Amino acid sequence: MSLEHLLDDLATVLPAHRLVRLPADRPVVFVGDTHGDRVATERVLERFDERTHSIVFMGDAVDRGPDSRGNLELILSQMLAYPHAVHLLMGNHEAWRLTPFSPADFWDSLSAEEIDRLANLLSRLPLAAWHPSGVVAVHGALPDLPSLDAMDSIELGSKAWRDVTWGDWDSPEEGSVPIPSPMRPSLDRMEFTRRMAQLGARILVRSHQPSSPMFLFGNRCMTLFTSCAYADGKRHVAVLQADNPINTAQDLDLVEL
């Protein structure tokens, strides 16, 4: 189905909330930035059945890679077919209209009408996903909120929104160096610990920051990439098995596609 037709149909099934609450009885597949890598998305969908798994794409589906339109069309078509199982969180590349940046080859290729329609739809994407085991997934960093329920109060363009979609973790002693940019908030270990406690979370899974090691903060934070456009081009996903106890991010199954 073409992107144009998908936009019409998806408007009726996108969730009304900024927080996706994942079921406890299904394995969850966390997918990092795919960035125009349709092959990566195809491999995710071939390996993990939407009828038995929850699949969370953690944002940045477009730009950088070879087939942004095809990649986005594939993710959105699966969201339409399996609205309770396939989820796309908002990353900064889904919010280009709200905070423009460069390079943005996908957005630059669209007409003004296409930008309007797509930007309006993507502005309704959820910002986070939550699993009852205590695992929270976002694109970037964590918002400063009193509880998970406050996710719905996040306004587009606010500080909390920017932390979620643009935020980096700053932990030089662990090898995590923020990308210098006025658009990217930089948060340290103390803020990680405080915000995780406020949300009642044990583990954070995210993407966004290629300068970060995979594991941070006593293995409580995992940074994933699932795109040939980044780092060494290896595509990884993390799988939360429904019956496995989760104490650290290393208890998730790391799968190379």
Image: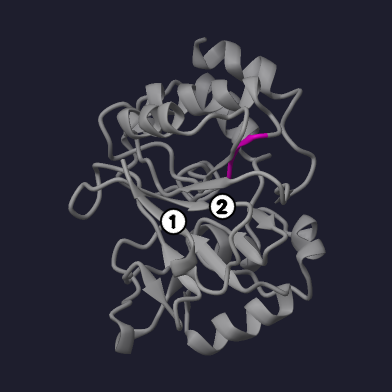
Q: Nearer the viewer, residue 177 or 117?
A: 177
Residue 104: tell me if it is visible: yes
Which residue is painted at 39% across and 56% down in the image? 224
Say what amino acid the circle numbered 1 marks: Asp
Find numbered disc 1 in the image and state the secondary structure of the residue it sits on.
strand
Q: Residues within 10 Å of mark 1 (few under 14, many from 20)?
A: few
Q: Which residue is mark 1?
A: 253
Left or right placement of residue 20 versus residue 175 in this view: right
Which residue is painted at 48% across and 34% down in the image? 48
Q: Point out residue 217 in the picture as x, y percentages from the top left corner.
A: 45, 82
Q: Which mark is residue 154?
A: none
Q: Residues within 10 Å of mark 2 (few under 14, many from 20)?
A: some
Magenta span: 85-89
**How many numbered markers are drawn?**
2
Q: Which residue is mark 2?
A: 241
Which residue is painted at 71% across and 33% down in the image? 84
Q: Point out residue 107 in the picture as x, y percentages from the top left corner.
A: 41, 33
Left or right placement of residue 110 versus residue 150 in this view: left
Asked if disc 2 and disc 1 are in contact, CB closer than 8 Å, the reply is yes
Left or right placement of residue 189 versus residue 116 in this view: left
Say what amino acid the circle numbered 2 marks: Gln
Residue 167: tell me if it is visible: no
Dominant secondary structure of the residues highlighted in magenta in the image: strand
The mark that comes first in sequence, 2 or 1, is: 2
Measured along the vertical axis of the image, is residue 184 above or below residue 34?
below
11 magenta-colored: no
The residues bearing labels 2 and 1 have C-alpha atoms spaced at a distance of: 8 Å
Q: Quadrant of residue 161?
A: bottom right
Q: Nearer the viewer, residue 218 or 251?
A: 251
Q: Point out residue 11 in the picture as x, y percentages from the top left corner.
A: 71, 24
Q: Point out residue 67 in the picture as x, y percentages from the top left corner.
A: 31, 26
